[in-house]
Amino acid sequence: MRPATLVRLALAGSRTDTARVVLTALSALLATLAGLAALTVLAIPTPLATDENRNRWSEQYHNALLVEPGLRGGTAFALLMLMIPVLALAGQCARLGAPARDRRLAAIRLAGATPGQVTGLAVLETGVAALLGTLVGLGAYLVGRDLLHRPDAQGRLALPTDVLPSPAAMAAVVLGLPVVAALTTALMLRTVTMSPLGVSRKAARERGPGPWAGLLIGLGLTSFLAVRPAMYQLDGNAEVLGWLVPLLFAVGALAAMIGVVIGTGWISYHCGRLLRRHARRPAALLAAGRLMADPWAGSRTFAALLAALIFGGGAAAQRAYFAAREQLDRDQGQLVGADGGADTFYLSTMNLVDAAVAVAILIATGGLIVALVEGIVARRRAYAALVATGVPRATLSRSVAWQALAPAVPAILLALTVGTLLGRGLVSEVSTGVSSTEICEATTALCADPATREQYTRIVYTPEVQRAVAVPLEQLAWLGAGALGAVLVTVGVGLLFLRASTALDELRTA
């Protein structure tokens, strides 16, 4: 089969296939913008130390996150975290209209294509859609860079529009994302057999998932708890700390995130068991059977949302630490008679982090909607058969709500708890050592004169203080409420598609 024919067949299909290609390209575009933004922050050069600039700050920018070299790594990491819900959205979009695509691929198989060629069509469709998205994202990045390059009167910039990542790094993002998307599609199709008679999949295992996700969560928490002891034991060994601390952060965050996502499958299965044992209404019993039949659907559906909540829980713990530090500085300032002022830079920075978490939850909501609608459309024959046998549509609607909310509530609580524990594993208390301050209790003229200053000066000693950082229950409650609201909105949108998917005509056409 010629390459041109492969591309034409890969991009052929119905309106659902077109929507899948467009959504996949849009997800790749957003991921490209996030990745290029992170690379741009890392590409900011650090100037050499001079007498006027001993801290090696990049003073051509407004924001301290870009000015101070030590803060750029965290800024780039936050931007990269935005790629997680976007990539999860791409994975959900790739499943949109899967039954219709399977029938189309089976027809191509019937026309004489080999199994490898049919698999290549599915992989090529995702890869081409992602490549289109990354190329458009690259163009949007370059155009936006020129449009946003607006120095002020002092020549300072709001964004790092004066630097570009290396061509190799940009090519890695633009070409790497389509390759990853194509390989992921190939991995998802490993259990699929495409024959001229149709598409079949290996049967799912009957027993529920094991509690192995707890080991991954424990590994993540242990990695974060090991950061402070490692920094204490290796104090002065900058070379080892330079790679050990980032490694502990990366391993811990990834292990905890995978553990929570996999653990949602265990939660879904056991929620189904509890519903089957204790529920008495048909809607809950239908949801119980579905949860036990496919417990991993919850992991696939809520993956992006749970990742955003873990990040949000850790950010809430960090905000609580900075708030406690600011309050302690104010209290210490009042003891020595100062005005009680404190540095609010870090709290202001956390506002940007909270905005990133909100954007991630918004993107994850889009993934939830796509996943739920895809599930309803894929099972429309089963729903139509239930309606034909006399099951009211209201019962099916309540069943869909049970199926979404039953695993979502404990999974949201688990994600917020793990994220908070990760943050508190780094900072659980604030402290100050014993210090002394000279205070001159006289007029400005007397205090400025060395001859009279000493007789009006007294020394105030401040004791050592240790305070536990409070658990940010209010912010965690807002995050949980926002995530639960996103799930409710998703259920509402899904129910709009349920009526069309339960029409009796679906028994003949699907």
Image (cartoon, rainbow, N blue to C red):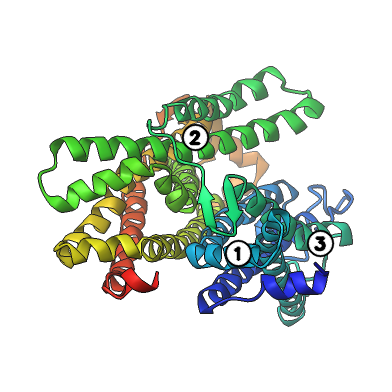
Residue 199's x, y, as percent?
53, 55
Residue 170's x, y, as percent?
81, 61
Q: Which residue is mark 2?
A: 259
Residue 80 or residue 161, whichever sits in front: 80
Q: Which mark is residue 170?
A: 3
CA distance separating discs 1 and 3: 34 Å
Give neighbour class at mark 1: few <14, some 14-19, many 20+ (Cα, 10 Å).
many
Tell me the mark number nearer the camera, choosing from 2 and 3: 2
Q: Residue at x 84, y 56 (%)?
A: 45
Upstream in the sequence, badge 1 or badge 3?
A: 1
Q: Are marks 2 and 1 in contact (CB under 8 Å)?
A: no
Residue type, mark 2 in image: Gly
Examine the rendering and report whether any part of residue 336 can be seen.
no
Q: Which residue is mark 1?
A: 105
Upstream in the sequence, badge 2 or badge 1?
A: 1
Q: Residue furthest top?
A: 233
Residue type, mark 1 in image: Leu
Residue 88 or residue 460, whichever sits in front: 88
Q: Quadrant of the N terminus?
A: bottom right
Query: Which secondary structure, mark 1?
Result: helix
Q: Residue at x 63, y 54 (%)?
A: 185
